[in-house]
Image: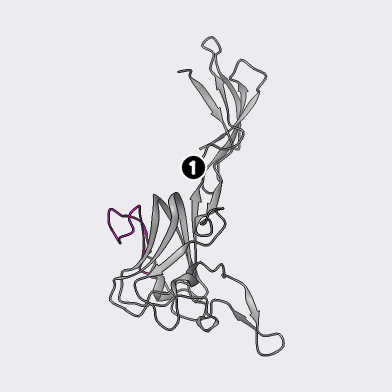
Amino acid sequence: HQAGVGVSARHRLFDAAQACGENGNETCAATASTEEHGGVASRAVDGKTYSYLPGDLPGRYFHQRYYDLNSCTHDSEEDGKQWLQLDLGVARQLVAVTIWNRADCCTERIRSLEIWVSDHPTVYDNATMCAKNTDIQDHTADWKWEAACIAEGRYLWVHQSNPEALTVCEMTVTARDPSTPTGTTFFRARRDLAPVVARVDPARGTTAGGSDVTVHGSMFPSDVGSVNVSF
């Protein structure tokens, strides 16, 4: 084994909820514990978030996440056991989940949500809870919950832990591509070369989902004067 330093671009992030099917470009299948008022589970991943539709009067527009515009889910129970499941097709390395609320009411319905991830299709069978919403503040109806969710698995559940209706108007699932990034190069270290780091740009990485820095100096037995490091 040769000691070395890998130089690569940051792993690609993508919306796993829209990456199913043979070619990885189809919406993933969604199911719910119960459904009511026509609020089928597939509405949670129909891609409708902030767009507005023309209203019934000139200059008037309706938000697509108004429930009557058929873009939100709705369950028929309010017992604290309701769930919405998303089958990602294959196990994914998850990073974050974003859930959009109804734009016309009911912010309390996403205050107590939990997100669980597992490789098993049965709810909570060896599942990991990667996020829980504990925000009890009053928000405007046009609100979304953005949660870090560091977990790996094929099945994702949104669980309503309070006796409130479970309504999801849109959901994105940010995942990390596990494959080696294109263009990765490994440089073998040389024992007689004392590494010299001239500077690091930027001094502190702030990129969402990772930190990218460029290290300048004499580090390898080559003409490479700087490397980009992602971690």
Q: Secondary structure at mark 1?
A: loop
Q: At x 51% / y 47%, what residue is drawn?
A: 209
Q: Residue furthest bottom?
A: 57
State which region is magenta. Answer: 112-133
Q: Position of residue 29 (x, y in %)?
A: 46, 64
Image quadrant in which the N terminus is located: top left
Q: Position of residue 72 (x, y in %)?
A: 48, 76
Q: At x 49% / y 51%, what residue is drawn?
A: 175
Classify 75 as above or below 28.
below
Q: At x 50% / y 71%, what residue is drawn?
A: 143
Colour mode of the rendering = one colour
Q: At x 45% / y 75%, what residue is drawn?
A: 40
Q: Could you tell whether 29 is left or right of 194 in the image?
A: left
Q: Could you tell whether 74 is left or right of 219 in the image?
A: left
Q: Could you tell whether 68 is left or right of 86 in the image?
A: right
| Residue denoted by label 1 | 178
Question: Which residue type does callout 1 highlight?
Answer: Pro
Asked if the stretch drawn in magenta spans residue 126, the answer is yes
Closer-to-camera residue (42/183) = 42
